[in-house]
Image: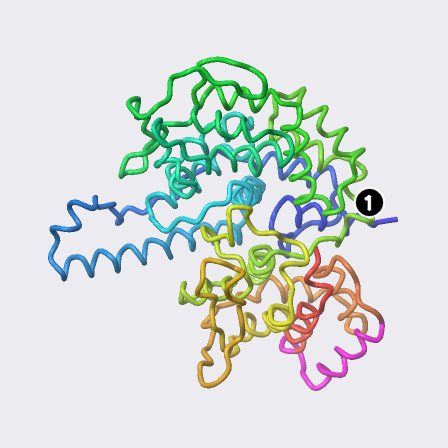
Amino acid sequence: MIDNKLKIKHLYWRANFGPSLDTDYSKSYEYHLKTIFDGIKPHQPVVLDYWNQVKSDYLKDMSAEAKVQYRKNERRARYDIGDAILDRYAGDKNLLREKMTLFWMGHFACRVGNPAFMSQYYNAIAENALGKFELLLTAMTKNAALLQYLNNNQNRKAHPNENFARELMELFTLDRGNYTETDVLESARALTGWTFTPDGDFHFRKEHHDDGSKTIFGKTGNFNGDDLIKLILNKSECPTYLVTRIYKFFVNENVDPIRVKELEAGFIKSGLHIGELMKSIFSSTWFIDSQNVGSKIKSPVELISGMSRYFKIQFVEPTFRLNLYSVLGQVLFNPPNVAGWPGGKSWIDSSTLIFRNRLPKVLLSDASVSIEPKKSFDALESTPTVAKGNKAKKTNSICDFDSFLQLTAKLKDDQFCEQLSEILNQKQPSAEVFETIRSFTWKFEGNEKKIKTAIYLMGLPEYQLS
């Protein structure tokens, strides 16, 4: 029997980025579920007032000094966009929308370095993250970052490029095996002429569009990109695939086909409304079954955002936070490939596990750490490592321990470790582990002892699970 506190923590880890320290566990699960959905607000776009995209023709005519300054501002804009999003994940507002946005950024995976395209890509996903899937899919098929990444700006009547059409079906909507090579070719023809302006606005170039007859999924017509979206959404495999992907991310990587079928029926009835699907998942009795609680390895974003929510961690140097994510293998706008971040056990290897276990000490006590962030786009070419030698650098992080110390003031001294673990961890360590932690912290007193205990608990393998 799972107690109420564990159920509520489970809900917040899956629907948000972990509970806040002041979560009221005396309230019912249903109360917290309602609070989360009542807290959904329209998306507030991420906008950088100081950044203006310069067209390549203008850039060529700039002085050398102006070009250097432009590139410097461009790099700053990239950092600031990523920082703004990560700050939202660590905050307290609209977190279900933000969690869904993180999921869709892995689903519609895209590498993008143009700041204007980065913000447009994130804002398009966030705005549609909890609405009808048709609106989200339409927005993404007309998004400059994705069109560029999958080469649809090179898709022309004379020379069709199949990249976008293939990934649209294989990764975004239907899954492999539910379309033919002919479907890919004909869909590519339907998408010819779909491109974007230098500012990132969608642009249809009629002169490059193939307006001839096409046969897709056994249906024949003079199809364009909008028609293709409707044809895909009418395929029965589409809702099955989407529900399965969402189940793996929010419930359990081991998919229960019976549950997926149940969810799929409601999803179809709602017109493929994402928010309604999420409400069905989180309100289902099976969502809080023991096999689903503490069954997922936290992604780097979930791990650091969860700690930041507990202790209100702030990073003085934005680049250092980015390097932390790079070492751990998850950088926003830079997935390993078009399939996105694989998740699960792929987050853990001998290097990242050691670094993950040390992370609480690094962030909560401003310890020095040596890191060598991954430099290659391709995750297969380079493994993130902890650097050796004289590259140690303090995190320069700032923590607010007031809420933590107020909460822990109510805990019993002789059971402090166990009771704190019930707040921090979904899975509880053995009695021997608690005794080991006490053997490390006995020499400390007062607030310092409490913070040291939290660091040790968050460094355990159990804290890696959500």
Depth check: give the residue in front, 360 or 447.
360
Instruction: Residue at 51% x, 75% y: name it.
Output: 366
Magenta stretch: includes residue 441: yes
* Left or right position of 391 against 77: right
- Considering every residue shown, the one lying at the far right of the view is 1
Considering only vertical position in the picture, is 27 above or below 359?
A: above
Q: Position of residue 261 (x, y in %)?
A: 76, 29
Q: Is residue 131 magenta?
A: no
Among the 4 quarters of the image, the one containing residue 236? top right
Magenta stretch: give its range.
431-448
Of residue 426 and residue 210, the one placed in the foreground of this image is 210
Name the residue that disc number 1 marks. Answer: 289
Q: Residue, x 34% and y 32% (percent of image)?
A: 195
Residue 46 screen position, x and y as percent:
39, 44
Q: Classify mark 1: residues with Cα within 10 Å, few (<14), some (14-19) or many (20+).
A: few
Report the side of 218 relative to 154 (left or right).
right
Q: Using the image as rendered, state which of residue 190 and residue 113 is in the foreground.
A: 190
- Quarter holding the C terminus is bottom right
Residue drawn at (48%, 25%), measured in percent from left and top? 186
User: With respect to residue 5, does 270 lie above or below?
Assistant: above
Which SS does the magenta portion mostly show?
Answer: helix
User: What amino acid does circle 1 point to?
Assistant: Asp
Q: Name the spot of residue 179 as percent of width and height, x first.
A: 60, 29
Residue found 64% across the figure and 54% down from its top: 22
Q: Quadrant of residue 446?
A: bottom right
State whether residue 455 is above or below residue 201. below
